[in-house]
Image (spheres, rainbow, N blue to C red):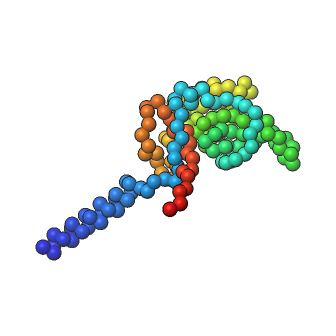
Amino acid sequence: MKKQILPIAIAAALVTALAGFYYSPQSAYAPVFMERQELERSVSYTTPRDLQNPGKIYHKAPYLYVNEKYKGIHVINNANPARPVPEGFIIAPGCIDMAIKGNILYIDNAVDLVAFDLNARVVTERVKNIFPEPLSPDGYPCYVERPESYILVGWKQNKITSK
């Protein structure tokens, strides 16, 4: 009888440990979704905005390109580093990374890769579904069900409720 209890105890401990891995506690963040067609029309150049949640920075003289996490890219003229001048903002929902080659800014527009011409200020190419959905800021994947045509474009912090 004792020989049977040990394997059962080990199996129970293993199942409990794995259940903790697969059924993680809820994230402190809720996913933000956008309809696929809206996402594909969303990348555009507009007036400057204030920095609120900056991410990566890319420098291509005389400009600084500063990511606004999940929102887009700030375009800042840095010809005079003592007085940088915000010139515009590239709206790109779901954007957290960028790179530049020549005059093309490559950005992630949620799960898509977008080529944005910095001179013409238009999207020149889109490669759909090349990137995985981003994890929440606290490291959890999105477990929320949604219609097929919706794409995760960001995360917002859940409201904290007191008990």
Outermost front residue: 163
Q: Nearer the viewer, residue 98 or 42?
A: 42
Q: Would residue 40 appear left or right of 11 to someone viewing this image?
A: right
| Image position, residue 38 (x, y; %) | 56, 28
Q: Quadrant of residue 95?
A: top right
Q: Would you say residue 73 is visible in this rendering?
A: yes
| Image position, residue 47 (x, y; %) | 75, 33
| Image position, residue 151 (x, y; %) | 50, 35
Q: Nearer the viewer, residue 137 or 65?
A: 137
Q: Nearer the viewer, residue 132 or 26?
A: 26
Q: Would residue 8 appear left or right of 68 to someone viewing this image?
A: left
Q: Nearer the viewer, residue 53 or 158?
A: 158
Q: Quadrant of residue 60?
A: top right
Q: Would you say residue 117 is visible in this rendering?
A: no
Q: Would residue 48 appear left or right of 36 to someone viewing this image?
A: right
Outermost bottom residue: 2
**Residue sitting at x 49%, y 53%:** 27
**Residue sitting at x 38%, y 54%:** 23
Q: Is residue 93 above or below residue 40?
A: below
**Residue sitting at x 21%, y 71%:** 6
**Residue sitting at x 63%, y 35%:** 92
| Image position, residue 111 (x, y; %) | 52, 36
Q: Is residue 147 above or below residue 2?
A: above
Location of the N terminus by quadrant is bottom left
Outermost left residue: 1
Q: Quadrant of residue 101?
A: top right
